[in-house]
Amino acid sequence: MRKTRPIITALALAMSLCGAVQAKEGGDQYPNGAENWMAGAVPPPGDYFINYAGYYNGNLRDGHGDEVDDANVSAWFDALRYIKVTDHRILGANWGWHVIVPLVHQRIELGGGSDTESGLGDITLNPFILSWHSENWHWATGLDINMPTGVYHAGEPRRSIGAHYWSFEPLLAITYLSDTGWEASAKFMYNIKTSNTGFKPAPDAPSMDYHSGDEFHTDFALGRHAGPWTFGVSGYYLQQTTDDELEGEPISSTLGPWSEGRKGRVLAFGPSVNYASKGGTQFIAQWQHETLVENRFGGDKFWLKLIMPL
């Protein structure tokens, strides 16, 4: 076991990070940076469609922030989201729910080889969204449930899109919009993961238990509204809070250039612009550059986002 552990660890890292290119971002199963303008302002009762489309390109970085040779990813993604907001009141808030279905086309280079895969990512369901509004303040809370529906090939991280585990993510989103048009929005999340009991270091190897660590992460936006336009900066921050574990034991930094427990971290920011039509349809374009990256892929993400009442 001692001789094979470094190989297992390296492959486990690739497995936990290869999802970072899907629309349901990374080992955390969430598209970091997806929420920005008016993140805490859930719309009035009705039916809504949101489309998140974009491109991501990044290189794998170790626990020191250094690039790993021959380890990079590029992906096109399109996530389809339906939101239902009802008139039903709970604690003074409107109750609603949503579902997100991601589609991904990705290419991963790892360990001297590369492969391309297209397919369904991990679907997200939130059956319980509560939203409040009060003058300049808007806020919402809920619980996202990320399901292991994505394409997954055990022992072949270059061909896997889904994370192959369930996760549960309580969230709180807040927006402040001043009378002069300045906006500050943030969405705070904590991703609690179950184990991937089908992890394999190679396709013909026996299954093992790999548990990716939990993560705190937040999306944010700061800018100003001017007529139908909004200009500013958006981004995200992620910090893994618990260790990655293999067969119940924390991943050790002695097995490679990875920090103890292989805790991931990333900060990203970039310009963002939003146009809102008189009918309520919004178009958002943004670029987010990742920095301070450790134990995960780091690169650039380009977004086009459509919000449309039905």
Image (cartoon, rainbow, N blue to C red):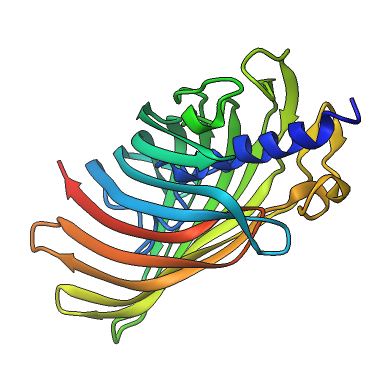
Q: Residue at x 59, y 28 (%)?
A: 166
Horizontal arrangement in the rendering, residue 195 relative to residue 48 (left or right)? right
Q: Which x, y percent locates residue 80?
A: 28, 37
Q: Which one is in front, 70 or 189?
A: 70
Which residue is situated farthest in the front direction here? 112
Q: Residue lying furthest right in this view? A: 2
Residue 122, can we see it?
Answer: yes
Query: In which image quadrant can residue 116 be found?
Result: top left
With respect to residue 36, does 24 lie above or below?
Answer: above
Residue 276 in percent (x, y) is at 16, 65
Q: Look at the picture and state if 64 lies above or below 91.
A: below
Which of 98 and 1 lies nearest the eye of the viewer?
1
107 vs 235, nearest the viewer: 107
Q: Residue at x 37, y 27 (%)?
A: 120
Residue at point 52%, 24% (across, down): 148
Q: In terms of depth relative to the viewer, which is nearer, 230 or 12?
A: 12
Q: Looking at the image, is 123 positioned above or below residue 144?
A: above
Q: Is residue 185 visible?
A: no
Residue 207: x %, y % from top left: 71, 15
The number of numbered discs placed on residues in the rendered structure image is: 0
Residue that appears at 69% across and 25% down? 201
- Where residue 99 sits, quadrant-wise, is top left
On the picture, is 32 further left or further right than 251? left
How far across and down, in percent of the image, does residue 98 sit?
Answer: 37, 36
